[in-house]
Image (tube, rainbow, N blue to C red):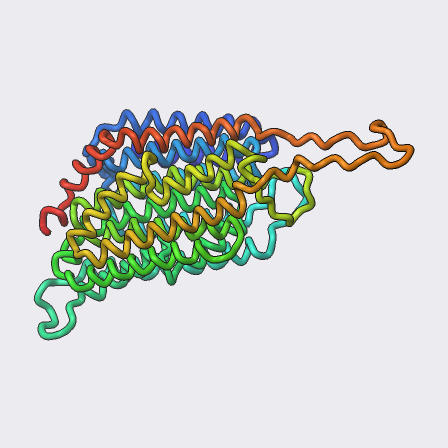
Amino acid sequence: MLYLLLVLFPISMAASTFVLRKNSGLVIFMALGAVIAEMLIAAQIPLDNPSLFLGVTLTLNALNRMFMLLFLMIGGFAFVGAWSLPHGENFVPIGLLMLSQVSAVLLLQNPFISTLLLALTGLTAVLAVVDLPAGTSSLVGTRAIAAALKYLVLMVVAAILMYIAFVLATIFRIGELPGRISLSRFILALLAVSFSLRLALIPFHAWLAGLVEHAEPLVAALVITLLNTSSLLALLVAFQTFPILLTDNAGPLRVMRIGALISTLLGAGLALGPGSLRRAMAYLILYDCGMVFYGLASVSSIGLAGAVFGTLNQTLAVLLMLVSLGLIERPDGRPPGMARRDLLRRWPVAGTGLLAGSLALIGMPPLGGAMSRLLIYQAAGENGWPELLALLTATLLALLALIRTAHERLLGPSEDEATPEPLMLGETELDRPAPRRLDPEPRSAAALTLILMLICLTVGLYPGPLLTTIDAAIHELAFIRAL
């Protein structure tokens, strides 16, 4: 019953908030109450206690419960950010639907149903991207619609490839078709392309860059943090269900690692190029996705621990970055379209949050990404020094890209302290207009940014409890014991 409550309760609350969506304050309070109730329910469910419902097995292990609590916390933070940041008028009900769907993905151990649910989450994310802006009379931009359609098409293709791979894996038998290319290699290739589409690895990255650049920051944060992370956990379930895909494919796994290295290097290199602040942040996320996928493709306990820890760090860092980005983009009285160079001076909390989130994403100590980088570097060292050198080069490029972006957009001289011009003949101080007063940062969003920075710092300084849970969950995986 508790399993069904985790899935169905957010759906019922989404329907209620959809009816009351014009009263934004009440809707946000209802959503926060639903998230807190979901967290209490998830904390009470006994671990590794499978239940059968309509022929489908539902269970919750320690790793999935940790990520479920993280997802619910991320959803709650996003709803708090909706007090002062731009979002769609149906953002809260759509966010509750996404939380329900990713909770179902974490509870299910059936890869076929998980595939359908992941496709459904893609459709729900599209609804959030094309949602009408709340509180304004403007319509959705054509570029946002194009980004949503691109994302929808690629997620449908990813779901089809994933489903074909699982069907072939079900009928595959060892020893069939002797003398030919093993069918397990083809299945692994389908899964690699499918999850590369979902994780936005290069060359399948166009949807993520377009989403970050043209969608509202809160919407992009939910899509990247919830859906990408649940996709990674679904891939672990697939490997757990079909371990033969890994034990018989040392060569293809090496190709996957090389592809992840290329994606990591190109993502960091693209962040060095010219472009908007949003596009630079999107490329840093691409770099981190490639790093996480490399840890996953290493198929070692150290690499997988680094990938899972890096996924957790990515979830927090991306939300921090995009919430800070939404605060930075608030109007401040300047003409639209004019880029500022003093964003850290103008928005000190948001500018600091953007820098902290970017540094956590790159893996700089003492923030949360440092431990995941150390584990992934160790896994790369076991595979040879060229792979380790490539990862270190990508990290250096990403750090240089952040330094360039900070120099161009954040650390410039203040643009609000204009030098007063001398009085004209016959002019007095009373004849001049009053100086323009700039609005401060919204308290709720600034507090949210500070809390996220504190969480990232705490995870970086005290990674032991999380790492213990991750290590225990990874050593229980069947394909790790088989390897």
At x 64%, y 39%, the residue is 415
In the image, taking residue 110 as reference, residue 268 lies left or right, namely right
To which quarter of the image does residue 442 belong? top right
Which residue lies at the image location 84% right of the left edge and 27% below the top edge? 430
- Position of the N terminus by quadrant: top left
Residue 113 visible? The answer is no
Q: Say which of 77 and 41 sits in front.
A: 77
Looking at this view, is 429 or 267 the one in front? Answer: 429
Question: Residue 126, how many percent across, how many down?
Answer: 48, 50
Q: Is residue 386 left or right of residue 194?
A: left
Image x and y of residue 477, in percent: 15, 44
Q: In the image, is residue 42 above or below residue 406?
A: above
Taking the spot 45% from the left edge, 42% from the top edge, the residue there is 221
Q: Residue furthest right?
A: 426
Picture coordinates of residue 194 (x, y %)?
32, 58
Task: Count up the numbered dots.
Answer: 0
Residue 432 image offset from top left, x and y in percent: 82, 32
Rendered residue at 20%/63% (across/down): 252
Residue situated furthest bottom in the rendering? 179
Camera-side residue of 260 and 276: 276
The answer to whether residue 446 is visible is yes
469 and 447: which one is in front? 447
